[in-house]
Image (spheres, grey):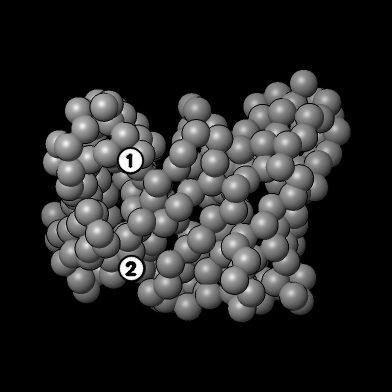
Amino acid sequence: KAGVTQTPRYLIKTRGQQVTLSCSPISGHRSVSWYQQTPGQGLQFLFEYFSETQRNKGNFPGRFSGRQFSNSRSEMNVSTLELGDSALYLCASTSGQGGNTIYFGEGSWLTVV
Amino acid sequence: KQEVTQIPAALSVPEGENLVLNCSFTDSAIYNLQWFRQDPGKGLTSLLLIQSSQREQTSGRLNASLDKSSGRSTLYIAASQPGDSATYLCAVTANAGGTSYGKLTFGQGTILTVHP
């Protein structure tokens, strides 16, 4: 079955703009999580959605937001982009119940100039 | 706050060698621990998942162990190959009453290079 799909794969934005990234989880998975990966900070948890509700949130400013739709697809939005937001944004999905492997997408590379 | 540390940060070995990657975590109240592999510019590929009640998991040439009480896990790779070159990450899920299954805390990773 298809894996976790993220779009777009690469994008370049200007400081002050906003960006929306999309994630389609594995069929049947109800939990979608987002992570930011940078060389300096490594992988950091942004938030998790389960059945359209935000279940967990990481320590990021309010400029970072997300949502999940009834088909479990998820989007994350970053407003008022800063240079430091340049990163690989990874989406992961799991069934949402304990004991199950978490699967990651290929990521969206965001460059802010 | 959970902290995950991986040692060494980088490792270079000749092909055929057996090797061990280490992961430690500060809070033993974990639900499970997962080892991932990341190739340059790519997403993460899950290698092994160990539940907190388990001691080890094996998949092919890979064996992961977990000692929850001491906050340690090791990933053993047997007969390493150049194709094993990648960054290896361990991550833990907190045991928070069933509300944190999608929230992982990652280590910084070990960059492994296996040369022919």
Q: Residue at x 74, y 50 (%)?
A: A7
Q: Residue furthest toward the right?
A: A17
Q: Position of residue A112 (x, y in %)?
A: 74, 26
Q: Quadrant of residue B87?
A: top left
Name the residue nearer the viewer: A72 or B87: B87
Q: Residue furthest toward the top?
A: A113
The three-letter amino acid code for the residue at tag 1 is: Asp
Q: Position of residue B75 (x, y in %)?
A: 22, 49
Q: Which mark is residue A10?
A: none
Q: Position of residue B67 (x, y in %)?
A: 15, 59
Callout 1 secondary element: helix
> Is label 1 or label 2 in front?
1
Q: Residue at x 81, y 30 (%)?
A: A13
Q: Counting other residues with Cα less than 10 Å from the Cα at mark 2, is it few (<14), some (14-19), or many (20 or more)?
A: many
Q: Is residue A85 visible?
A: no
Query: Mark 1 — residue?
Result: B84
Q: Which mark is residue B31?
A: 2
Callout 2 secondary element: strand
Q: CA distance from mark 1 to mark 2?
A: 28 Å
Q: Counting other residues with Cα less than 10 Å from the Cα at mark 1, is it few (<14), some (14-19), or many (20 or more)?
A: some
Residue A72 as seen in the image, left or right of residue B36: right
Name the residue nearer the viewer: A18 or A110: A110
